[in-house]
Amino acid sequence: MATPDLPTITQEDRQDIFLKVRDLTKKFPLVLANDHISFDVRKGEIHCFLGENGAGKSTLAECLYGFYSPDSGEILINGQRVRLNSPLDAINDGIGMVHQHFMLVDVLTVVENVMLSIHSGKIFLDYSEAESKLEGLCKAYGVDLDLHAKIWQLSVGEQQWVEILKALYVGVNLLILDEPTASLTPQESERLFSVLQKMKVQGLSIIFITHKLKEVMAVSDRVTVLCKGKKVATVDTSKVTLEELATMMVGREVLFRVKKTDTTRGEPILIVEQLRANNDMGRLAVDGINLTLHHGEILGLAGVAGNGLKELFEVLFGLRKATGGKIFLAGKDVTNLSPGAIKRKGIGNIPEDRFKMGVIPDFSVSENLILGQHRHTEYLRLGFLNEKQIRHDAEKSISEFDIMTPSIDHPIKFLSGGNVQKVILARELRLDPSVLLANQPTRGLDVGVIEFFHQRLLEKRSMGVGILLASEDLDELLELSDRIAVVFRGQITGLFDIQDAHRDEIGLLMAGIGGV
Amino acid sequence: MIADIFKNYKIEERQNASIYTKVGFFILAIVMSLIISFILIRYAGADVKDAAKSLFTGAFGGKRELIESLIKATPLILTGLATVVAFKARIWNIGQEGQLFAGAMMGYWIYLIADTQFVWLNIILAIIGGFIGGALCGWIPALLKVYFKVDEVLSTVIINYIMAYFLSFMLSATGPWRQADSFYQQTPLIADNAHWPLLFEGYRLHFGFVVALIAAFIMYLIMSKTPLGYEIRAFGSNPSAAEAQGISSSKLFMIIMIISGGLSGLAGAGELFGAELRLSSRISPGYGFTGIIIAMVAGLNPIGVIVAAILFGGLLNGAVRLQVVTGVPSALISVIQAMVLVFVLISRVLTSYRIRRIKNVA
C-alpha cells in the first residue's frame, strides 16, 4: 500500500505538478464511490486511472470536471485551491473531459457541436474561423473527419474524435479521457496513443481512464489503481508488470485465457448470399457479403467502425431492410422478416448498443428479462402477465448468470454495463437459439465479466450453436473464433481459419491495405 | 452575491422518494395553486373569504354539489384516460376534443338508424357507437403516421377542427340533423328510452359515471398487468429497443390510438345520452383539452385520473358559484386549472430531485 500524500506542498511541486487532489471523498446514497483519494498529475504526463467498473474511476474524474461535488477533500491546480462547481468552472481552470457516453447533439454537424462548447461572447457565430481552426487540428493530429457530417451519421469511433476535438479546441491544460478506446480499432487506438504522446510533449497533462491493462502499459507514465472506491497505489508504469497491475486491480489472480475445446464444425445453419444494404445516409454500406455460419462454430468478424458491420448485423436481425441478396436460416429464407419473426425462428441477438437497443431502462430487471418473450404462453395466464412465473424465471436467471442487482424489481438503468449485458445474454439464451448474433458484446466491460461472457459463448458453441461475433478487440476474436472474416467498406476482404490467422495481416486488411 | 449563494447548493437526483413525500408535495402543490389563485381573485375585486367559501361549497359543499361535480368529472375521467394510454407510449395525441365529438356523432347516428325501443340495447349501441366513432378518429392519425410519417400532433389537432366543423355542418340550417324550426344549432332531444339511467333518484348523475369508473379500472389492468400494457410502457421508455426485441411499432401505434380515441369517444357518447340529451357543440366545453391537463396532474396513472378529474370537475362547478356570489368571471377557472398543472409539475420535479448544500470544499 502507498503511504498517503503529505499535505505540505514544496516549492518544487508547485512547478512540476498541475493538479493535486487531497483526501477526496464522494458518497452516493448507497455507495462510497471515492474514499479519501489523494494523487497528483504532473505537467506533460499521461496518468492512468485503472480499475474495474464500479471502482470509482469515473466518479473521481467527474469530481475533477465539476460534474459532481466532492463531500470532502480538496483540489489544487498549480498549487491553488479551486472549487469546481460545474464543468464550466473546470474548463475555465483548464480541465477538459471526454465522456464514455458522448455528450453530442445528434442533429448538429461536427463544427456546430464544437461551437456549442465555446462561449465567445459574440452575438454571431463565426463558423469559418471555427472550421479553419478545426481543420488545422485535424491535420496536425492526422484525423480524417468530415466536419460537415451530422453526428448521427458518424460511427462511434468518429464521434469520439469529435469529443476530443471539442476539448482541444477550447485549449485545455488537462484532458480527461474516460475509457477512450472502448470503441476504437487497434489501429485507431494506436493513432490515439500517438496523438496523446504529441500532446504530452507540448506540456498537456492527460488523465486516461481504463480497465485495459495493455493500454496502461502502452500509454502511461504513471498509473493510479483504484479498487472499490479506495486507492490501491500510484506507481510508475515502467516499474510494474501487467500481472502485478491485474492483481492490484481485481484483488485476485486473473485468468487471461479461456479454455477452448476442440469441436467439429457442423452443418451450415446461416447462409448469407450477396447481401446488400444502405446506411442511414442512404449510401451502400453492405456491398455483396457472402457468409456461411456452421453449427458449433464461432465466426469472427473483424472490421473498423463505419465499414458496414453495424448495418450487416441490423439486416441479419431484421432492423434494416436488405436492398439485395438473401439470408437463409436452416435452408429457409428469412430475408427482411421483422425482428420478432426472426427471433422466433431461432436467432438470438446481442446488440451493439446495449442500452439503446437491448433494454428498456425504466423497466425492472425481471421485466427486461421477458422483453420480446412477454407474449409467450409460459408468461401468460388468462391473457394477463403471469407475475409468478416471470419472477421465478428472473430469480433463476439472476443466480445462473450471476447478475448483481439489489433485487429483481430494481430498474435496470441503475445497473452496471456488465450486469445489463448479462441480463441480455440470459434473455437471448433462454430461447435456445440456433444462431447467436453478437456485435461488440464485451465492449467496455470488466475483465471478470468478459471472462464469464467468453465461457458462456464457448459453452454454447460446444452445444452446437452457430455464433457470429464481431469485435473491435482483435485479441478477443483471435482467442474465440474458429474462423475470422475481415470486413472493409461493406465487403469481406479476407477469410482465415484460426490457425492461419495473423494479427498483423488482419489489422492491415481492416485498414484496407493488402489482401484481395 | 446571489451567485455565491447558488454556488453553495447543488441539485441532485433522488434515488427513491417515498409515497408520503409524493402525496405531501401533491397537496402542497394544490394549496400553492389555490393561494396564487386567491391573490388573483383579490385583485379582481372580490373578498377572498367569500371567494374561497363559494368556490369550495360550489364544488363539494353538499350532496347535490358533490354529485354535480361527479357529473362534470365523468367525461374528464374518460378523456384523461385517453391521454394516459397515448402519453405513456409517448404518442402525443391531443385530438381528444375531436375524438369526443366524433364519438357523440357516431353514437347519435347509430341511435337514429337503429331506432330501437329497448333501453339496454340503446345503451349498448351508444357505448359501441361512441367508442367506434372516437376510435376511427384516432386511427386516421395513426395511419398517417405509420404510412406517411405525418406527425401525430399536427394530424390530431387538424382533426379537432374537422370534427368541430363537421358537427357544425350537420347542425347548420341545411344540415340533416338540425332540429326543425329551432333557432339554435342543435338536434331534437333524444327519446326517453335512449337516455342513460340515473344512478340516484332526483339527481342528474348518470350511468356514464359507472362507465368511466369501469374504464379506469380496465385501463389500470391493461397498463400494469397485460402484455399490451407492457408493450405500451416499453415503447414509451425506449422505442428502439422495443422494436429491436420484436414489438411492432406500427401495429402498437394503431392499437394505442384506437384505444385512446375510443375512450374520448365514450366521453362524447356519455355526455350526449346521459347529460345533454341532445347533440350540439355544447356537449363539450373543452373536456378533451382539460383531459390532457388531468392526465398530466395524475402523473399518467389511470386511478390517479379519477381523483384529478373529480378535483377538476369540482373546480368547474365551484367557479360557477364563485361568479354568482362574488362576480368574479368564471373564466378564471382556466387560470386556476393552469396553476394546478404548473404547481403539480413543479412538485414532481421536487420529488425526483433534491437540493443539497455543498460542504467542506475549499
Image (tube, helix red, strand yellow):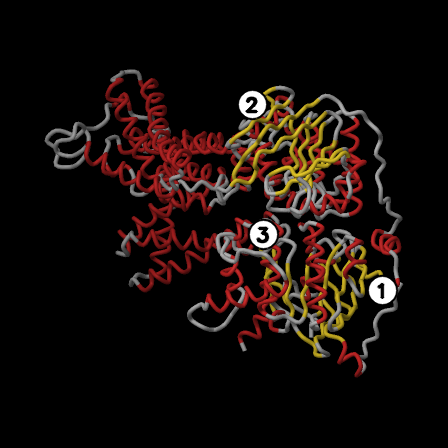
Task: Pick the residue in front: A310 or B302.
Answer: A310
Q: CA distance from mark 3 to mark 2?
A: 35 Å
Q: Residue A74, which numbered label?
A: none
Callout 3: few (<14), some (14-19), or many (20+) C-alpha neighbours within 10 Å?
Answer: few
Q: On the image, which quarter does residue A92 sit in?
A: bottom right
Residue placed at 40% from the left, 55% from the top? Answer: B339
Q: Is any part of residue A163 visible from this angle?
A: yes
In the image, residue A324 sits, relative to residue B327, either above or below, namely above
> Residue, x 60% and y 53% (percent of image)?
A158
Q: Which residue is mark 1?
A: A235
Residue placed under numbered mark 2 in the picture: A383
Q: CA distance from mark 1 to mark 3?
A: 48 Å
> SS of the residue at dot 2?
loop
| Crowding at mark 2 (Cα within 10 Å: few <14, some 14-19, many 20+) | few
Amino acid under label 1? Val
Name above or below for residue B239 compared with residue A337: below
Q: Which mark is residue B21?
A: 3
At label 3, which amino acid type do we have? Thr
The chain carrying label 1 is A
Q: Looking at the picture, how far across and down is residue B116, in whole percent?
A: 27, 16
Q: Quadrant of residue A274?
A: top right
Instruction: Kindly identify the residue that appears in the image at 23 percent across and 23 percent down.
Output: B191
Do circles 1 and 3 both sit on a common chain? no
The nearer-to-camera label among 2 and 1 is 1
Q: Position of residue B90 (x, y in %)?
A: 47, 42
| Element at label 1 | strand
Amino acid tagged 2: Gly
Q: Nearer the viewer, residue A394 or A136?
A: A136
Of the residues tagged 3 and 2, which is closer to the observer? Answer: 2
Characterize the local packing of mark 1: few (<14), some (14-19) or many (20 or more) Cα atoms within 10 angstroms: some
